C-alpha cells in the first residue's frame, strides 16, 4: 500500500467481465511516469472516484453513451489530483484539480478537462457531493422527476452517492421520501440521519408488500438507478402521471444475457400507457453546460446550512480499487466510494 | 341489416375475451327505446366509431385509465347521432351531435358529453380526422414526439385513423416519415397518396433489416401504437435523444398472459438510459381542455388545403360491429373504421 513515486502504477482492464467483474478482470501494472509536454500538466492522483457507470465502460457499448475502455488500458475515472509539473499557463505546481486521470498514480493532461479546486476544505467532495454524483441526483430529480410538495419519491441505493442526494433534495422540496437499501444499518441511517420518511431493505422477501405499505398514496417519482427487483416492486405502485428518470440500472450491468422470461416489456409498456408515465433516460455529461452552475450554487448553500449530509466510503490504495468496484456493484459500500491513491 | 326504429338494438359485452375477441364475446340484444326525461335528449345513432382502445375496456383494468365495460352492458364508443327528442334547451330535434352513445341504436344523454356538429359536410369526420383519433395523432406527435425538420419519424398502423395523421403531420413538419403497415396495398397508399418517404409491411420476415435500410440516419421519433415485433425492430435504431410517445400497444391488447422470455425489459431500460430516450404514455382524454382548439384550427386548415388526406373504412349495420372490431385488432381495416348504424 505504499505510494510509489518513481513509477506510474495503473489498474488496467485485463478482460471484459462476464457478469459481475472478478479481480482477474483487472491487472495492476506499472509504467514510467509520463512527462508533461508543452501546454500540458503532470498530475499526481490523490483521490479516485468509483461509480457504477464504470461497469458499462468495461463492455463494448454504443459509443453514443461513452467510449468503452480498451483492453490493456487504464480504467477511466474522475480524480482529484495535485499538479506536480506544469507547462500550462493556467495551472501551477502544487494546486489541486478535478479531472479524469483514471485508475493510475499519474497522468498528463492538456488542461481542457481540468477544474481548479482552489481551497476546497475536503477535496474529495469534488467527486461526490459537489461533483458528478450529486449533480446527477440534482438534474435527474429536479429536471426530469419534478417532485411536487406532498408527492411520494422512491429511490434505491438510497445511501449511495446519488441516491442519498436524491432523497435529501426531495425532502427539501416537500416530498415524502422512501429509500431502498441493502441492510439494516443503511436503513437506519437513511431515516435517522438523512431524514427519509421510510427505508426498506431490498433483500426483504416481502419488499413489494413493504413498499406498498410505505407508499400509501402510490409513487409519483421513481428515481431509477438499480432496476431488477426494485423496479418490479415499484411498477404497480406508480401513480397516473408518474415520472421515472433513468440514471442507471446497476442490477443489470452484469447481465451476461437477457434474463429468463416471461417478457415483462409489453406489460410495462401497457402500464406506461394506462398511467401516462414518463420514463426518461439521461446521461449527466449532457447537462453540465446548462445546469452545473445552478447545482453548485444550490448544493453549496444546502451543505453550508447543514440541510444535506454526505457520507464517504473511503478505500485506501490504488490496488484496492478493483475489489472496491466489485463491492460497489454488489451494494457493499456505505456512501460515496472514493479511493485514496496518493498523499 | 334493416334499421329498426321501434326497438333499441344494442351490442353488449357477453364475456371478457381471452386474447383476441371472438364473435361470441358479444351479443346483440334489444330493449325498448329509452325516453328523454327533463333536461335530456334522445339520440339516434348514425355513425359509431371503432377504435383499438375499446379492446382495453373489455378487460378489468385500472379505473385510472378508463372504466371497464360491465358484462351485459353495451360496448362504449364515440358516435355521431341525430337528436330525435329533446327536453334540453341547447339541443333541438333534428340536429347532429358528437357523443358517446355506444354500440346501440338509441341512447339518452344529459347533453354534457355532446358537441353540436352544425353543418359539417361529412359528419363521420367528427369521429376521425376532426375527432379523437386525429387529435391523438396531433398531441402525441407534436407535444410528446416533437419532430424537428430532417428528423426521422416511424409510425406503425400507418394507414389507420391515428397513424395516417401522425405521418402526414410529421411530413408537414419537415420530417422523413417511414410507415409500417400490413399488406402491399396499404404500403402503396402510404407512399403514393399520403406522401410517406417509405413504407414497410410488418409481416415481412426481414422487417428489422428493411427498417434499418429505410432509416439510414436512425429513428428520432417512434410513435408507438402497436408494440410487438415493430417495437423490436425500432428499438436498436433509436437515436440518442429519441422520443417515444406511447399511444397504444395493440399487439398486446389481446395477450392473455405475459409473453415467453427472454425478458426484454432490462435491456430496453439500458437502451433508454444509454440513448437518453424519453418514453411517455398519454391518454387523449387528458388533453382536450388545453389542446383541442389548436388541433381543430390546424386540422381544418390542413384539410381545406388538401395537405392531409383521410380514408374511411366504412361498415354497414350495428350487427357488423363485433366482426369489424376483431378485424381492426387484426389490422384488416384500411382507414378509420366507422360503422354506419342509422340513416
Image (spheres, coloured by chain):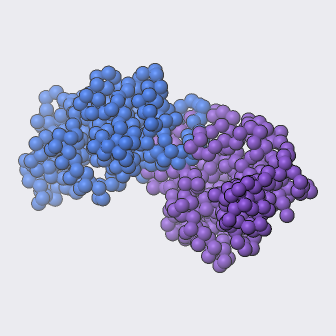
Chain colours: A purple, B blue
**Residue B126 or residue A93, whichever sits in front:** A93
**Residue B22 or residue A288, whichever sits in front:** A288
- Looking at the image, residue A110 lies above or below residue B187: below
Quarter of the rendering containing residue B15: top left
- Residue ID at (85%, 46%): A30
Question: Residue A336, image x and y in percent?
Answer: 73, 60
**Would you say residue B269 is visible in this rendering?**
no
Farthest residue, direction right: A2
Question: Residue A18, image x and y in percent?
Answer: 74, 35
- Residue ID at (44%, 25%): B210
- Residue ID at (48%, 47%): B241
Quadrant where the image shows the C terminus of chain B = top left
Quarter of the rendering containing residue A185: bottom right
- Residue ID at (54%, 64%): A291
Farthest residue, direction bottom: A305
Quarter of the rendering containing residue A333: bottom right
Using residue A266 as the reference point, say whether residue A67 is left or right of it: right
Number of numbered discs visible in the structure rendering: 0
Using residue B313 as the reference point, say whether residue A18 is left or right of it: right
Question: Residue A248, image x and y in percent?
Answer: 62, 50
Amino acid at each position: 500500500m505504499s505510494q510509489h513515486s518513481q513509477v506510474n502504477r495503473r489498474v488496467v482492464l485485463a478482460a471484459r467481465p462476464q457478469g459481475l467483474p472478478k479481480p482477474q478482470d483487472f491487472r495492476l501494472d506499472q509504467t514510467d511516469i509520463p512527462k508533461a509536454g508543452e501546454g500540458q500538466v503532470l498530475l499526481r492522483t490523490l483521490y479516485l472516484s468509483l461509480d457504477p457507470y464504470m461497469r458499462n465502460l468495461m463492455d463494448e457499448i454504443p459509443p453514443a453513451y461513452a467510449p468503452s475502455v480498451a483492453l490493456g488500458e487504464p480504467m477511466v475515472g474522475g480524480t482529484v489530483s495535485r499538479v506536480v509539473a506544469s507547462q500550462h499557463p493556467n495551472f501551477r505546481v502544487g494546486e489541486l484539480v478535478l479531472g479524469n486521470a483514471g485508475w493510475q498514480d499519474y497522468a498528463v493532461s492538456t488542461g481542457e478537462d481540468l477544474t481548479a479546486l482552489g481551497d476546497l476544505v475536503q477535496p474529495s467532495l469534488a467527486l461526490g457531493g459537489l461533483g458528478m454524483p450529486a449533480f446527477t441526483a440534482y438534474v435527474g430529480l429536479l429536471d426530469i422527476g419534478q417532485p411536487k410538495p406532498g408527492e411520494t419519491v422512491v429511490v434505491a441505493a438510497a445511501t449511495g452517492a446519488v441516491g442519498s442526494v436524491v432523497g435529501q433534495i426531495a425532502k427539501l422540496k416537500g416530498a415524502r421520501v422512501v429509500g431502498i437499501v441493502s441492510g439494516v444499518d443503511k436503513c437506519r441511517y437513511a431515516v435517522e440521519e438523512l431524514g427519509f420518511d421510510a427505508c426498506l431493505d431490498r433483500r426483504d422477501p416481502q419488499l413489494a408488500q413493504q413498499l406498498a405499505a410505505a407508499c400509501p398514496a402510490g409513487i409519483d417519482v421513481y428515481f431509477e438507478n438499480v432496476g431488477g427487483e426494485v423496479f418490479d416492486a415499484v411498477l404497480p405502485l406508480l401513480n397516473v402521471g408518474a415520472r421515472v428518470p433513468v440514471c442507471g440500472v446497476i442490477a443489470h450491468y452484469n447481465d451476461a444475457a437477457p434474463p429468463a422470461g416471461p417478457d415483462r416489456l409489453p406489460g410495462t409498456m401497457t402500464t406506461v400507457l394506462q398511467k401516462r408515465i414518463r420514463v426518461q433516460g439521461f446521461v449527466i455529461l449532457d447537462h453540465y453546460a446548462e445546469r452545473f452552475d445552478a447545482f453548485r450554487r444550490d448544493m453549496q448553500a444546502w451543505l453550508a446550512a447543514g440541510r444535506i449530509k454526505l457520507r464517504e466510503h473511503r478505500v485506501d490504495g490504488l490496488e484496492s480499487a478493483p475489489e472496491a468496484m466489485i463491492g460497489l456493484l454488489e451494494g457493499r459500500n456505505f456512501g460515496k466510494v472514493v479511493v485514496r491513491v496518493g498523499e
